[in-house]
Image (cartoon, grey):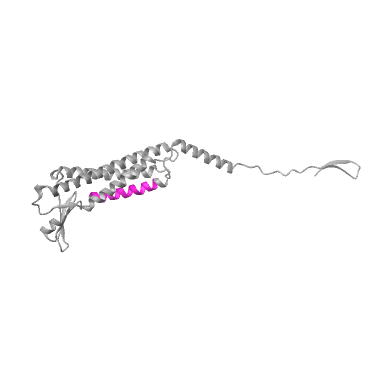
Amino acid sequence: MYVQITCLVLGYVSTALCTTTTFWSVWAISGPESASVLGPIWAWKGLWADCMQIETGQYYCEEQGSMFLADGYLIAIRAFMCFAMCLSGLACFLLLLGMECTRLLKDDPQSKRKIMFICAIFHCIAGILILTSVAWYSAMIVEDFFSFETQDNMIKYELGPTLYLGYISCFFSLSTGIVTFCMPGSKPEQYTNATKSTMVGYSANTAYRAPARSEVRSSEYVKPVGNGTSFMEYV
């Protein structure tokens, strides 16, 4: 049960990190080479907008326009991250239902195991999608940085902190899926044996015990009566 609780916590952390990675627009930041050209200007970009900040602290962001005008790899990464975010959230909900400590389907461990297997698959798929997205975006940044076609660009981007956050989210998601798949809960026969042993122990401890009866031996004697007759008296 404690392993499942740990998986639940890691799953929620992974979902939160995946959501932050999707909407935090610091996937790429301007490097030192750009600073030597632009001066005290910091530029960054993500999946949804390109931003720039000057020394005074003012900044502005420009949306990347229509989805159909963006680059193909950027559209694919957006879809991957949104799908991973939905799968991760659904997996956390299923994990909450399939845990042994929940009352839902308490007497049907086989159904709980199936729910845990589905949860593990969803977490693994989400982790793979996150890994694909951040690795693909990282590869595109590295390619643009060393490409001869972009040597004259004023801004040369490097890997941003969001990518590292995405790798951490991927690790948590895959770890949760693997552990959940390996430890989905008690098997039906184990659950049956545990239930039987519990019932036997309960019956042995709570068996009805008849109160001890005090046996009083009767002594029989004849008591004379005034008229000379006698009768039997039992004490």
Range of the magenta residues? 4-22
Looking at the image, the residue that sits furthest to the left is 152
Which quarter of the figure has residue 234? top right
Principal secondary structure, stretch drawn in magenta: helix
Up the image or down, 42 lies above or below 68; here it is below
Q: Nearer the viewer, residue 10 or 22?
A: 10
Q: How many marks?
A: 0
208 drawn magenta: no
Where is residue 59 drawn, in percent x and y? 16, 59
Where is residue 28 drawn, in percent x and y? 18, 52
Image point 12% across, 59% down: which residue? Answer: 36
Image point 34% across, 45% down: which residue? Answer: 176
Q: Nearer the viewer, residue 55 or 48?
A: 55
13 drawn magenta: yes
Looking at the image, the residue that sits furthest to the right is 228
> In the rendered view of the protein, which quadrant contains the C terminus?
top right
Q: Nearer the viewer, residue 181 or 89?
A: 181
The reply, left or right, for residue 219 in relation to residue 196 is right
Where is residue 137 drawn, in percent x and y? 19, 46
The reply, left or right, for residue 98 in relation to residue 54 is right
Where is residue 61 drawn, in percent x and y? 16, 55
Up the image or down, 167 lies above or below 54; here it is above
Up the image or down, 34 lies above or below 184; here it is below
> In the rendered view of the protein, which quadrant contains the N terminus?
top left
The reply, left or right, for residue 147 in relation to residue 128 is left
